[in-house]
Image (cartoon, rainbow, N blue to C red):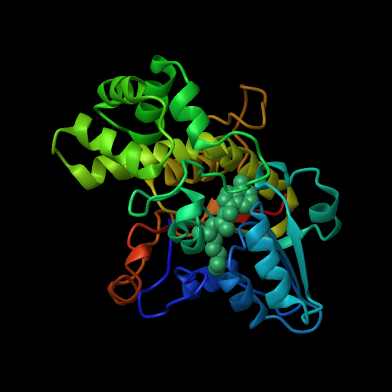
Amino acid sequence: MAATTTSEPGSFHVPVMVEQVVAGLNIRAGGRYLDATAGGGGHTDALLAHLDDRGRVVACDRDPEAIARLEERFRRDLRVTVYRVNFAGIGGDPIVGRFAPYDGVLFDFGVSSRQIDDPQRGFSFMHDGPLDMRMDRTQPLTAADVVNDYPEAELARVLREYGEQPRARRIAAEIVRARPLATTAGLAAVIERAAAGRERTKTLARVFQALRIEVNGELDAIDRALRAAYDLLAANGRLVALSYHSLEDRRVKRFLREMAGEEEDRWLALPTTGERAVRMRALPRSAVKPGAEEIERNPRARSARLRIGEKLAR
Ligand SMILES: C[S@@+](CC[C@H](N)C(=O)[O-])C[C@H]1O[C@@H](n2cnc3c(N)ncnc32)[C@H](O)[C@@H]1O
């Protein structure tokens, strides 16, 4: 979840760790880059500043509102192709594939400030609004469906797995008792009752995170997208991923370890005998965090973790 500052009212989203992202992508002036989560276009803009006329950025998002904003922002820049796609499907997508191989692929996971701060999107327990939470409002499943229709055990599983919520069963039981729920404020009141005053904000944040991940199928999408990004990259191309919670970061970390041949490979179904292939190297090995000055300026950057992988020539 990232980034806007109170000092910039009306801004769509303040991009996180821009310098580190640009450095991580090791930009070539005439290179091709895929911004798979372009949001308000802040990172796209930073990439463009390092490209000459031969460079290209394919700026994608699954949210039609973000796409409208991106089209408006970059309509005069012939180097940019704005494209609505769920990054789960970039492997084999004809538009994304047309510009492959890429010199860099960027993922900035989670939701934008515009999405979080709009009460009508239903992402935040800080604002009252409908229980929606869809990044793409053309999809049918909403948070209201999960909250009101999932069996109690299934709801508890979502809260435990995606919210790492120790009181998942108790909260699920309270939610089921309070059905039907229509608003974020109504849900927040139930969660607060179930949490009985313990770690109020943390509990609310985790339950809302869990529902958001479920509604948008976020973790499966990340697994599929990382794998596809590898195929879309040129040799020596860079994968840069910004995560905002441990469930996201763990997936990127595990993917890079697998591609570095350090862990068993779940994606490529390689023969189990013989040496593990080394396809990428992590640069550096551990995640990079934002500096204190950035966190001061933009508190939503505080949980960001950046990982960089380089595809090795075969
Ligand atoms: C943190 S924001 C990105 C902000 C952007 N880097 C910027 O500078 O403004 C994350 C964006 O990713 C989009 N997103 C999340 N999951 C996605 C998916 N599976 N496919 C495509 N876009 C996705 C969200 O709609 C949101 O706009």
Q: In the depicted view, which residue is nearer to us: 212 or 266?
A: 212
Which part of the image, by quadrant, shows the N terminus? Answer: bottom left
Where, by quadrant of the figure, is residue 53 drawn?
bottom right
- The residue under the point 23% across, 47% down is 201
Where, by quadrant of the figure, is residue 99 drawn?
bottom right
Where 16 sits versus 261, above or below?
below
- The residue under the point 32% across, 45% down is 205
Q: In the depicted view, which residue is nearer to us: 198 or 249?
A: 198
Percent position (x, y) of residue 125? 34, 48
Where 97 sits versus 49, above or below?
above
Residue 11 appearing in the image: yes
Q: In the depicted view, which residue is nearer to us: 2 or 100?
A: 2
- The residue under the point 68% across, 46% down is 86
Percent position (x, y) of residue 69? 66, 69
**Seen in the image, is 145 located left or right of residue 147?**
right
Where, by quadrant of the figure, is residue 142 drawn?
top right
Where 294 sits versus 122, above or below?
below
Q: In the depicted view, which residue is nearer to us: 171 or 1?
A: 171
Where 98 sits versus 134, above or below?
below
Percent position (x, y) of residue 119? 45, 55
Residue 263 appearing in the image: no
